[in-house]
Amino acid sequence: MTRIAVIGAGPCGLAALHAFEQARLDGVDVGEVVCFEKQSDWGGLWNYTWRTGLDEHGDPVHGSMYRYLWSNGPKECLEFSDYTFDEHFGGPIPSFPPREVLYDYITGRAKKSNVRQFIAFDTAVRRVSFDDRTQMFSLALESWETGESAVRTETFDYVLVATGHFSTPNMPEYPGFASFPGRILHSHDFRDAVEFAGKNLLILGSSYSAEDIALQSRKYGARSVTIAYRNAPMGFGWPDGIDEVPALQHIAGRTAHFADGTSRDVDAIILCTGYQHHFPFIDPELRLTTTNNLYPAGLYKGVVWTANPKLIYLGMQDQFYTFTMFDAQAFVARDVVLGRLPLPGADAMAADVDAWLARYATVEDVPGQIDFQTDYVRDLMSMTDYPGFDLDMVRQHFVTWEHDKEDTITGYRDKSFASPCTGTVGPSPHTTWWDELDDGLARFLQR
């Protein structure tokens, strides 16, 4: 019997389990699929925890979610084509839901697929190695199912790495950090904007985390928010109390000094400086090493490890598309494992990767990035029986969303979009996002 290991029960891991289960329901012998999840519940990053630093088992906390986090893109751009928002919620909901709503949606499909039975919770993968002689993977596993640590080793024919890459912080150092009298933290450890009410906050970064944490902090009472960018400002029409300055140079006491010669006193510093692809549990010859980009080298079709095609990585790209891209990748991965999608030779796989990388090198702006990833998802969907949806509509939604943010950074979440699966247009929210202080599911779903 073929044995397949899936590492992680977040959106990518659940997508993989869903894909295999769909094949099983069609009468295909998929072998034995086992998913290992070090947390005590599914959802990956969407499984909110108050913890920072270490979890209850002494491992680094996986989750980077915080209270009051809302989707920063239209839900219609991540809608499962085989499990729509209309189906899950029994009718239309606004286009920008909070975390709890999206978690409910993700896990709703997993419940419908009945895939929880394949997940070993509270089980960490400590090592992944490959035996060239047996052509099998060996996984060293540590489990706390009984409340006490138990270590074992199991062998598998295929391994799908679905751990994500937004949980190991990139932590830069600046002169003066060691003597700064306030709190310094990475966005990975940010949990509640209310903590910074009345404070003067400095945020380092110029991408989605910096944008959202700046808005959240000001919305929930920060006295001021200064965003220091390294290369270029985000340039949005920020509300009063938020502004952008060139790169931080150094800290002297509480005073932050910037590249344009200005300075200001701050009470806390949040590093929105990105994450590392970090897989210390995978043997070096199997380990993906890459920066955060739209097409990591070494992965055929963005998923199959060309140096050993029995190893598959899911969701390792930087992302406009999320859940639907993970689904498309999972269906490709499943069909590779089942032999329904024969792989070309090593040279042909390398040539395909090089062709995508050559195209990626010509991308110069955000619309180009959106087009690139749209075509990548389209390519994946053409290879399997993953249910189709209006991909061109999603692409246009991303373009519209980018323009909406330029028009109003505090109001873009109040816009409505049409579903690429059902055509349903999300209704307007009952309260504008900037004025809504409750991110609970029940509150959001009020009509």
Image (cartoon, rainbow, N blue to C red):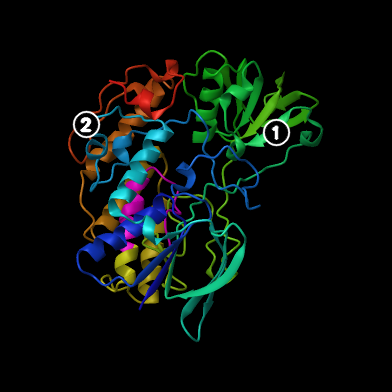
Instruction: Give me the disc on residue 184.
Output: 1
- Tag 2: residue type? Gly
Tell me which numbered mark, 2 or 1, is placed earlier along the sequence: 2
Residue 95 spot, x, y in % from top left:
31, 29
The residue wearing badge 2 is 91
> Which quadrant of the rendered structure holds the N terminus?
bottom left
Mark 2 to mark 1 CA distance (whole Å): 43 Å
Give the answer, above or below, for where 369 lies relative to 177: below
Q: Residue furthest front?
A: 146
Give coordinates of residue 234: x percent, y percent. Answer: 50, 29
In depth, the one of 152 and 401 nearer the eye is 152
In the rendered image, the residue lying farthest to the bottom is 133
The quarter of the image holding the C terminus is: top left
In the rendered image of this protein, does residue 398 appear above or below residue 197? below
**Amino acid at dot 1:** Ile
Residue at 57% of width from left, 37% of height from top? 50
Instruction: Check the image and name the residue furthest to the top.
Output: 240
Whether residue 383 is visible to the viewer of this picture, yes or no, is no
Is disc 2 placed on a helix, strand or loop?
loop
Q: Is residue 36 left or right of residue 339?
A: right
Residues rendered magenta in the picture: 313-332
Give the residue drawn at x 30%, y 70%: 30
Residue 127's image quarter? Answer: bottom right
